[in-house]
Amino acid sequence: MEKREDEHNVLLLAPRLAASAVAENGLIRGGDAGGREEEEAGLGRRLLEENRKLWKVAGPSICMRFSGFGVTIISLAFMGHIGATELAAFALVSTVLMRFCNGILLGMASALETLCGQSYGAQQYHMLGIYLQRSWIILSSCAVLMLPIFLFTEPLLIFIGQDPKIAAIAGLISVWYIPIMFANLCNFALQMYLQAQSKNLIVTYLAFVNLGTHLFLSWLLTIKFHFGLAGVMSSMVISLWIPVSGQLIFVFCGACPLTWTGFSSEALTDLFPIIKLSLSSGVMLCLEMWYNTILVLLTGYMKNPEVTLDALSICLNINGWELMISMGFLSATGVRVANELGAGSARRAKFAIINVVTTSFSIGLALFVFFLLFRGKLSYIFTTSEEVAAAVADLSPLLAVSILLNSVQPVLSGVAVGAGWQSVVAYVNITTYYLIGIPLGAILGYVLGYHVKGVWVGMLLGTLVQTIVLLFITIRTDWDKQVEATRQRLNKWYIDGNREKADSSGSP
């Protein structure tokens, strides 16, 4: 019994010991126990090592996000060849309803990224499995509460003034999205859990299988057998459950022996603090993901909404490709910051932030130039309509600016996830997006008559202000205090590993 208590105390004190090493070594603000070694190693070696850790998480994360987004793009392309109304309806469901629901689920799952990342850095390995199970419980309950949105899509869209013809087809499409929503919640939680341990390489392989399966099935069911809308949607359902099944097999079959010891009754305890952090995370990310949704809704009330929605949907989906890279860096930033804070290393957390912001911005700048040079030409991948293609070309400069801004803003949000600042960023998002961006967009688009361009410009200004504020917060942060805050959070929710094993229902 004495030995067990000693082990418990050692685990509890791990983050404290790491943090106290800072004072013992007499390092400057933002330093850590490994600071002297880092200084001796030189900048080149530090950059090489940090980029290795960064891409170990970011690479698979980007691949999976490309795969998931690619499934939507492939579906969009096949829907466009079925008909303009089907394309508009699919765009409405995928960019409004699914963005709404995914914003909630992914946002709430990002709490798992904070907790798993910090626990892994503090070597509290068994806690990752418990947090994963708690996340599944919370996300599943949330998904059940959102089911009416998918069951009553048609009357809901008609009520808010959308075209009845588009709303009718959107109602059919939304029912197909119910199994997709449950696949997404499982996938989000598993990705957060695996990437906190840098064990998400399996995700890369599953991403390629996922994308290839959807492309083949969409061609087979839509072009070959002419199943139309049902063919595209059934292919989506099948392909999106593939990575979920693969990750579950990977975890349950012993690939994560330190962090997964089986289902535990401890997952049913202390849910309220996790729910609280999940809600803060959900609000933070929802406010970001819903921003473009409001852009789509506002343009739906303009003249010739079918062409406007089609053009804007194509632009936002192209923008989404670049955003998948930035979202991959968001995940990697969250993991790197959380791991280093959990380990008590403030200096390395700061270095990781500088490195990932620089890397992501460089990629965004290259893509900014690319889309300015090839403005409008990519639209023919998604449509054969000259009218829609011309509208896309007209919006391309705004698309390029969006890509540049999105290369930095999500990464700064990743810093917030890693440090556990979700509630602070939620307030920033409310102010910059909903009190600045949307009102400006409405004035420019409707009052001054700049239409979709005006709406988009106003909302881009909101994003710019938000990016500046987050950058200021990040620069002004005392990272030694963040190490202490992390230690307190981990110790508060810690569960003894031996007790957790005793309560486990079994180890796969």
Image (spheres, rainbow, N blue to C red):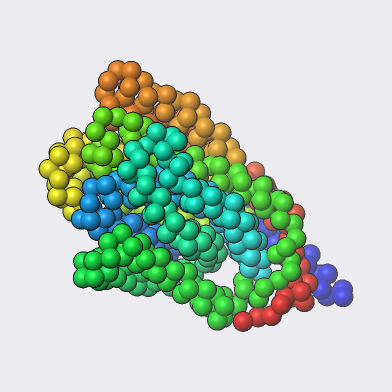
Q: Is residue 303 visible?
A: yes
Task: Give the residue at x 52% y 64%.
Answer: 186
Image-based side of 278 in relation to 398, left or right: right
Task: Give the residue at x 50% y 43%.
Answer: 286
Q: Position of residue 30 (x, y in %)?
A: 57, 45
Q: Position of residue 110 (x, y in %)?
A: 54, 53
Task: Give the residue at x 49% y 66%.
Answer: 198
Query: In the image as oriented, which residue stretches furthest toward the right?
Result: 1
- 367, above or below 495, in the image: above
Query: In the image as oriented, which residue stretches furthest toward the left?
Result: 386
The image quadrant that residue 58 belongs to is bottom left
* Depth order, front residue of 253/298: 298
Image-based side of 393 in relation to 107, left or right: left
Q: Position of residue 145 (x, y in %)?
A: 59, 51
Q: Position of residue 63 (x, y in %)?
A: 36, 63
Task: Give the residue at x 35% y 40%.
Answer: 164
